[in-house]
Image: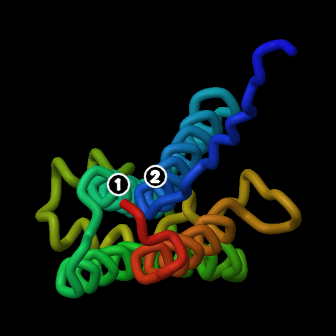
Amino acid sequence: EGPSYELRKEVFLLTKRHLFFCGFLSTVFLMLYVLYAQYVLGLEPCPLCILQRIAVIALGVIFLCITLLPPRTTGTKLTVSIFIIIFSLAGVGVAGRHIWLQHLPPDQIPGCGGDLAYMISNFPLFEVFGMVFSGSGECAEINWSFLSLSMPAWALICFVLFALYGTWAIYQTKYNGY
């Protein structure tokens, strides 16, 4: 008889850190795609697109922070979930405004203004936000679509999913290991 080899079955333990890291990775992949769309496909982002990117980056930072230091107490879980919901809702609001501008009749589309860098360097910050949210002609253009939805529509869907996934990952009880 030869030596007996025992097959050892390694079990992959899915933990909350893995769930949070998946949220972080989704924000990274989303940002990689919009950078691909900008630099390879030649789609220049409008001011509303840039605000949506900021919301995605903020969500990515939150997911990375809770990957490295998972919330364990009720208070930290509540705080982190509030931040995830706030930034997700901010993204939904900006994307919703963007979609609204894209569906205006041509005679109601606001005229084109300067780009975001120009506005920030020449106007007070509060006034810049007002100008950005009033929109411009470039925000009304639809240069890209997938399954008949424009990029802001997909961004809106992603923000809703980030809010749902983030709060679920924080409060779920099946994968309690850290």
Image point 58% across, 29% down: which residue?
Answer: 39
Q: Is residue 176 above or below residue 151?
A: below
Disc with the residue nearer the chain's start (2 vs 1): 2
Image point 76% across, 16% down: which residue?
Answer: 3
Does residue 109 appear left or right of residue 126 in this picture? right
Q: Position of residue 60 (x, y in %)?
A: 39, 54
Q: Position of residue 119 (x, y in %)?
A: 26, 54
What amino acid does circle 1 point to? Answer: Thr
Q: Nearer the viewer, residue 107 or 168?
A: 168
Asked if residue 49 can be seen in this view, the reply is no
Q: What residue is pinned by disc 1?
A: 67
Spatial separation of the CA atoms under disc 2 and disc 1: 6 Å
Question: Looking at the rendering, in which quadrant would you find the C terminus?
Answer: bottom left
Q: Position of residue 159 (x, y in %)?
A: 53, 72
Residue contact between numbered discs 2 and 1, judged by CB atoms under 8 Å: yes
Q: Position of residue 7 (x, y in %)?
A: 74, 33
Does residue 4 appear left or right of residue 171 in this picture? right
Asked if residue 63 can be seen in this view, the reply is yes
Q: What residue is pinned by disc 2?
A: 21
Image point 17% across, 48% down: which residue?
Answer: 121
Local secondary structure at mark 2: helix
Local secondary structure at mark 1: helix
Does residue 134 appear left or right of residue 30 in this picture? left
- Crowding at dot 2, Cα within 10 Å, few <14 / some 14-19 / many 20+, comes out as some
Q: Quadrant of residue 51?
A: bottom left
